[in-house]
Amino acid sequence: MLNEKVTENATLPAPMIVESESRPRSEPRKKIHLASPIIDAEMKEAALSALENEMMVMGESVFKFEEEFAQYCGTKYAVSTASGTAALSVTFQALNIGRGSEVITTPFSFIATANSIVHSGADPIFADVEDPGVNLSPSKTRAKIGSKTRALMPVHLYGQPARIDEFHDIAVESGLSLIEDACQAHGAEFKGRKVGSIGDAGCFSFYPAKNMTVGGDGGMITTNNEELADAARSIRDCGRDKNSKYYHGRIGFTSRLNTVNAAIGRVQLRRLEAWNQARIRIAEQYRKELENVQDIILPPLERSIEKAVYHLFVIRTKSRDQVKKRLADKGIEAGIHYPRPIHLQAPYRQAYGYTEGAFPLSESLSNEVLSLPIFPTLTEDEVDRVCEALKQSLAP
Ligand SMILES: Cc1ncc(COP(=O)(O)O)c(C=O)c1O
């Protein structure tokens, strides 16, 4: 089966060009997409200016974007990379986590979460999600800690913060690194702190469907650890020593963020808070309109110490496949994040011998989750239309 990201990628519409940050009350779109990246005039101008005036690789915009992203997250450092996957793998290498090491993470995520561990040479060890919820369970994680464990990596899935304070305590108690996979959670908060600023490192993706993009692939590592930041800067840039072009202290990658993408990212970052607020309002409208609908489970409400940023609004229903198809017939694109948990994906079955039943909660989520359209320019009328269509699609 194609993984959901490929499907999404293929159907991701051309970016919307908008001049205003508010939710328009314009003519309803015929087709309602699941996501709709925004590229406005200022972003286009920034891209062109970067192309004309800066070095294409490691230009000034890259360093400014890193500085601004670190400031936004409340960390001392941010190091940009070519993708979220690269941000994660570079982080493991910077922490010297490789062959012979294990990293505990969730099987219910996009496959890149675990791939990044494998890329670094370490082995992913899975623990199931909490119940109820979609994020890694701290107690199940604790039970998996062994002599080879070097790090814990919860994912803030769908923009919902994981129980990062509990993971922090476990990591400190057990002498492990804590890496936050924040690839879906730009701007989410836990006890007033931005996700990505609590663990040893946070990793973000700027893939176009995310809460903010760079107009293509891109990633960012956030950290307060200077040594980690220096190592990451070197590893993403061919293992170069600081300030010496052809002396390499490490085996690195060509995994830098291009200047033109950084220039777009800087403008996107300035829009992020308003966009997240729009997502939160859309999530509230969905909750209100769907709260009494039978046969669906709404996403768990975040606790008062958490701020979710609704990268995705994901309901659960036993008749998921029927509903998805009926919505598509009505011109509404819904998504499945993710139809197969990572441990049951072919390479993980083959390498680690996983079979069905290993992580039952993740497996039932995979059978029931359905992502409804959510993006900042989705109008109230369009949310009404999705809710109405969803109610009709649930009929036997
Ligand atoms: C949870 C999670 N981790 C990692 C990644 C990898 O990011 P990228 O696609 O930028 O490599 C993604 C991206 O979809 C993701 O959603």
Image (tube, rainbow, N blue to C red):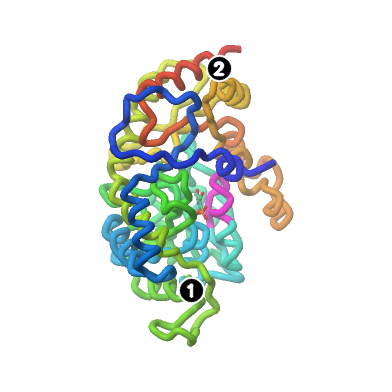
Q: Quadrant of residue 124?
A: bottom right
Residue at 57% in and 12% down? 395
Instruction: Check the image and report above or below for 256 versus 250.
Output: above
Q: Is residue 389 in view?
A: yes
Q: Tell me: residue 356, above or below residue 285.
A: below
Would residue 179 be found to the left or right of residue 324 on screen? left
Contact, CB < 8 Å: mark 1 with mark 2?
no
- For label 2, being within 8 Å of ligand 1 is answered no
- Under circle 2, the secondary element is helix
Front one among 160 and 275: 275
Specify whether 187 is left or right of 176.
left
Q: Position of residue 108 (x, y in %)?
A: 55, 44
Residue drawn 61% across the image and 12% down it: 396
Q: Residue at x 36, y 36 (%)?
A: 376
Please rate how many residues cluster around mark 1, counting C-alpha atoms within 10 Å: few if below 14, some from 14 to 19, many from 20. Answer: many
> In the image, what residue occupies the spot 31% across and 52% down?
267
Q: What segment carries the magenta color?
A: 104-114
- Could you tell me how far apart the alpha carbons at marks 1 and 2 are, in whole angstroms? 49 Å
Total numbered circles = 2
Mark with earlier residue (1, 2)? 1
The residue carrying mark 1 is: 235
Which amino acid type is marked by label 1? Ile
On the question of residue 165 being in view, the answer is: no
Q: Amino acid at mark 2?
A: Ser
Residue 75 location (% of width, % of height):
30, 62
Above or below residue 390? Residue 108 is below
Q: Position of residue 129 (x, y in %)?
A: 51, 43
Q: Residues within 10 Å of mark 2 (few under 14, many from 20)?
A: some
What residue is shown with label 2?
393
Left or right of 160 in this view: 341: right
